[in-house]
Amino acid sequence: MWRASILTLYPDMFPGPLGTSLSGDALARGTWSLETHNIREHGLGRHRAVDDTPAGGGPGMVIRADVLASAIDAALPAGDERPRLLMSPRGRPLTQARVRALAAGPGVAIVCGRFEGVDERVIGARGLEEVSIGDYVLSGGEIASLVLLDACVRLLPGVMGKEASGSEESFEGGLLEYPHYTRPREWEGLAIPETLLSGDHARIARWRADEARRLTAERRPDLLKGD
């Protein structure tokens, strides 16, 4: 079973949308599991404080190293080989290749940051890998972790209806996905390209490859730099 453990200040945000549709069905069948760990349970004092002011001054608050380390140690026993991820806008961008690698492994443990971030010392001391889902800032790591989990879970064996569904998508071959069409044959004066109706599979494959490259050149030319 592929296992996901989430360390968060807001465990009620899970499973959220992951409890519905394909991921929810797979969760109910036991294809994967999801557990949450409340960081605040390891907070200090009567109010379970988890954060403090930034060293050197500045706005906001920072999650304490001792608190977060205690939560990680309690949630992840020695010998747990799953990658330890910290959702962070300064992390390495999440790619489809990384998603496939994570989906092929035993699962993931994800730390969801809040406030200004987490104490830098715990990142190195507990081997956290910072991961970003885009060049923008969210209120916390929970939504980002839902994105990462959805991307991984849909690739687990048996989750999608057809294995080919996951291999002919955007980014799988370094290109954006080609356009799709279905019935009706004509809609509001717009027709399905004749090539797709020809029954010539080689011709259809060439058309799809050409369209994928055209769309990539228009919208994500950076993906073609390695060509």
Image: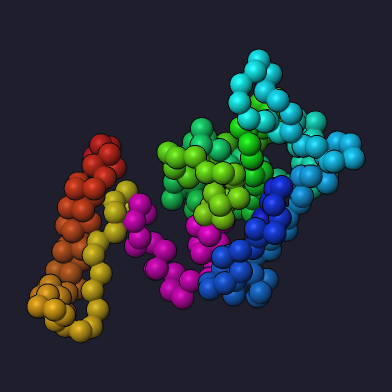
| Residue located farthest toward the top when viewing the structure as drawn | 56
Position above or below: 187 against 62: below
Q: Main secondary structure of the magenta part?
A: loop
User: Along the line of sight, which residue is nearer the eye, 139 or 212?
Assistant: 139
Q: Residue at x 67, y 23 (%)?
A: 54
Position above or below: 23 against 73: below
On the picture, is 48 further left or further right than 199? right
Q: Residue at x 70, y 25 (%)?
A: 53
Position above or below: 195 against 41: below
Where residue 4 sits, quadrant-wise, is bottom right
- Asked if residue 15 lies in the magenta stretch, the reply is no
Task: Name the spot of residue 12 as percent of width and height, x first.
Answer: 70, 59
Query: What coloring was used for the rendering?
Result: rainbow
Q: Residue at x 29, y 51 (%)?
A: 175
Is any part of residue 215 visible from this angle? Answer: yes
- Asked if residue 159 lies in the magenta stretch, the reply is yes
Position above or below: 3 against 43: below
| Residue located farthest toward the right when viewing the structure as drawn | 46
Task: Name the spot of residue 137 as percent of width and height, x first.
Answer: 49, 40
Where residue 36 sits, quadrant-wise, is bottom right
Is any part of residue 76 visible from this angle? Answer: no
User: Along the line of sight, which residue is nearer the eye, 73 or 206?
Assistant: 73
| Residue located farthest toward the bottom when viewing the structure as drawn | 184
Task: Name the spot of residue 170 as percent of width and height, x first.
Answer: 34, 56
Q: Residue at x 62, y 33 (%)?
A: 117
Q: Which residues are magenta?
A: 149-172
